[in-house]
Image (cartoon, grey):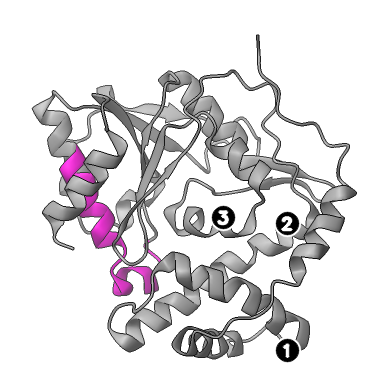
């Protein structure tokens, strides 16, 4: 896709009939990025800092929300620059060098910027029985793409029910958008009810990213979409971990073979998730404020 095609796709999907959206970025990665034009366009007046109240994250993780108005020429230059930056960040050489992805998403929502900030910060810290508090980097596009393969329907609804559109660039450079309920309810509880099994499954995301990085390098792109790859790799890696050692890079060659052959493995682990979920029924669920 050309830059203009990508820009139009993101703009049409996220702005829609709305004139204002929010850009979410991870500024802690700014110094690693080679596209500095984007950050030169950002002023302090643009920035709303997403604060994390957890003591281990205070000062270690900070996200920025930047309002973008479709009628502002300056804002639209920033919008264009953010897309260019996001596309540069998925260059395999940049990924291999560990530069990370600072452009997280473009968000359309009825929430105020303060409410959206609270939603992001509180949803990112999840309590897991027996494990304590864990950071779930759902806002990272390298994670977001795979979350919706792993999480169940209720958990996906909890993430998106206050969101009209969550747009991002996937690892193949394709614009993606997830649509939510577009509600504007004040949450009293941000728990996703994650179980230890869910937490273990989330660990497969980094492995899927490593497999896809090697796969894209070998074939000079991608013959299947990131979503299709995730649907193949997730059950395949479960099979591999049950039968082989995950501690070395053998799973990468295995995963590439799965993608090349389009080999499908049974989703037998879903039943195990259902059992684990039934044992976790006592966790607090979503409530809305009347």
Instruction: Of the two numbered discs 2 and 3 on the same chain, state the one appearing first in sequence.
Output: 3
Pinpoint residue 137: horizontal percent, then vertical percent.
55, 49
What residue do we see at 65% from left, 74% from top? Answer: 235
Pinpoint residue 195: horizontal percent, then vertical percent.
79, 51
What residue do we see at 38% from left, 75% from top? Answer: 224
Q: Quadrant of residue 270?
A: bottom right
Q: Which residue is mark 1?
A: 244
Nearer to me, 234 or 59: 234
Q: Which residue is mark 2?
A: 198
Classify the position of the N terminus by image quarter: bottom left
Secondary structure beneath label 1 = loop
Q: Are marks 1 and 2 in contact (CB under 8 Å)?
A: no
The prevailing secondary structure element of the residues shown in magenta is helix
Q: Quadrant of residue 191?
A: top right
Label 1 neighbourhood size at 10 Å, few (<14), some (14-19), many (20+)?
A: few
Q: Which residue is mark 3?
A: 147
Q: Are marks 1 and 3 in contact (CB under 8 Å)?
A: no
Classify residue 77 as left or right of residue 283. Answer: left
Secondary structure beneath label 2 = helix
Label 3 neighbourhood size at 10 Å, few (<14), some (14-19), many (20+)?
A: many
Which range is magenta? Answer: 79-99
Nearer to me, 115 or 232: 232
Instruction: Of the two numbered discs 1 and 2 on the same chain, state the one appearing first in sequence.
Output: 2
């Amino acid at each position: 896709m050309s830059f203009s095609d990508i820009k139009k796709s993101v703009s049409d999907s996220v702005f829609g009939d709305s004139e204002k959206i929010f850009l979410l970025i991870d500024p802690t990665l700014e110094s690693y990025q080679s596209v500095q034009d984007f950050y030169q366009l950002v002023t302090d007046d643009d920035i709303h800092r997403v604060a994390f109240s957890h003591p281990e994250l205070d000062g270690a993780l900070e996200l920025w929300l930047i309002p973008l108005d479709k009628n502002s020429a300056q804002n639209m230059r920033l919008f264009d620059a953010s897309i260019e930056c996001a596309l540069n960040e998925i260059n395999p050489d940049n990924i291999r060098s560990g530069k990370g992805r600072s452009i997280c998403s473009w968000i359309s929502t009825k929430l105020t910027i303060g409410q959206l900030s609270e939603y992001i910060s509180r949803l990112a810290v999840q309590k897991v029985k027996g494990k304590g508090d864990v950071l779930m980097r759902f806002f990272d596009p390298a994670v977001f793409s795979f979350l919706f393969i792993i999480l169940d329907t209720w958990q996906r609804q909890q993430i998106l029910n206050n969101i009209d559109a969550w747009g991002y660039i996937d690892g193949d450079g394709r614009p993606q958008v997830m649509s939510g309920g577009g509600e504007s309810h004040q949450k009293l509880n941000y728990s996703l009810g994650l179980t230890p099994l869910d937490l273990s499954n989330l660990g497969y995301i980094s492995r899927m990213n490593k497999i896809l990085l090697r796969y894209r390098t070998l074939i000079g792109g991608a013959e299947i979409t990131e979503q299709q790859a995730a649907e193949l790799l997730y059950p395949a890696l479960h099979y591999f971990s049950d039968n082989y050692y995950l501690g070395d890079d053998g799973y990468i060659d295995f995963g590439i073979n799965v993608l090349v052959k389009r080999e499908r493995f049974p989703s037998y682990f879903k039943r195990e998730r259902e059992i684990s979920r039934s044992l976790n029924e006592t966790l607090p669920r979503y409530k809305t404020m009347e």
